Image: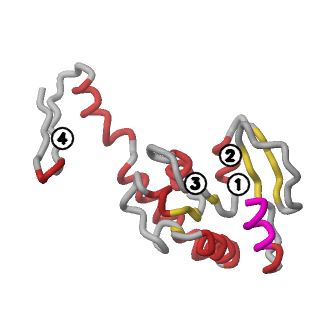
Amino acid sequence: MNDRLAPHLERLGVRCEIRIAGRGIPDLRFHPLVRILGFVPDIYACIREATVCIVPVRRGIGLLMKVIDSMAAGTPLVVFEFSTLGIPEIRHGVHAYVAATDEEFLEYVAEALAHPEAMRAMARHARHLVEAKFDWDLYMDPLEAILGGSKPVVAGGEGRAGRSYHVER
């Protein structure tokens, strides 16, 4: 963000502030567009206040909760493809800008800042997707059954080699 995104936005004449929140941020000299917040007690307030949430993560494991959090908060997103691997329903230009390369990422952040109405529409679609796929209520009955509740669970889907796996109690 410091070496590529901030100078790119500055060259384009985009007036913005890139805020970085979290623990363990290196003590470096940052570009004037970059503001280090460090640990914030209410990250969701920061996400909701943002014009756009950028997730520059390109490797790691697991589902990136920061993507789901941003979608749930209704904040427009620019992400790398890797960040969407746990949410295969995300579609570029529908739910978020999804970049395959560094150059696309830079382009999409500038595009998002230049077209806030289009980004708000994508954020609404993303919010609907999160409500449909990640609402706790969708998982409570199956979880209760797994943990010893009284309701049976039938979880379907294609497993490896086309085999179906089902769990019943």
Residue stretch rendered in magenta on the structure: 1-9
Q: Is residue 56 left or right of residue 25?
A: left
Q: Residue at x 52, y 52 (%)?
A: 59
Q: Which residue is at 45% across, 58% downward?
A: 84
Q: Secondary structure at mark 1?
A: helix
Residue 37 in percent (x, y) is at: 79, 45
Q: Which element is circle 4 on? A: loop
- The answer to which of marks 1 and 4 sits earlier in the sequence is 1
Assign a secondary structure to mark 3. loop
Write down the residue under mark 3: 57
Q: Which mark is residue 45?
A: 2
Q: For mark 4, what is the residue? A: 155
Of the residues tagged 4 and 3, which is closer to the observer? 3
CA gap between label 4 and label 3 equals 31 Å
Residue corresponding to mark 1: 49
Q: Position of residue 155 (x, y in %)?
A: 18, 41
Mark 2 falls on what kind of element? helix
Picture layout, residue 102 above or below residue 138: below
Q: Which of pointers 4 and 3 lies earlier in the amino acid sequence?
A: 3
Is residue 140 magenta-colored? no
Q: Amino acid at mark 2?
A: Ala
Look at 65% across and 63% down and name the residue there.
52
Q: Earlier in the sequence, mark 2 or mark 4?
A: 2
Question: What residue type is disc 1 on?
Answer: Glu
Indicate whether 130 appears above or below 124: above
Q: Residue at x 63, y 59 (%)?
A: 54
Report how many numbered discs are placed on residues in the image. 4
Q: In front: mark 1 or mark 4?
A: 4
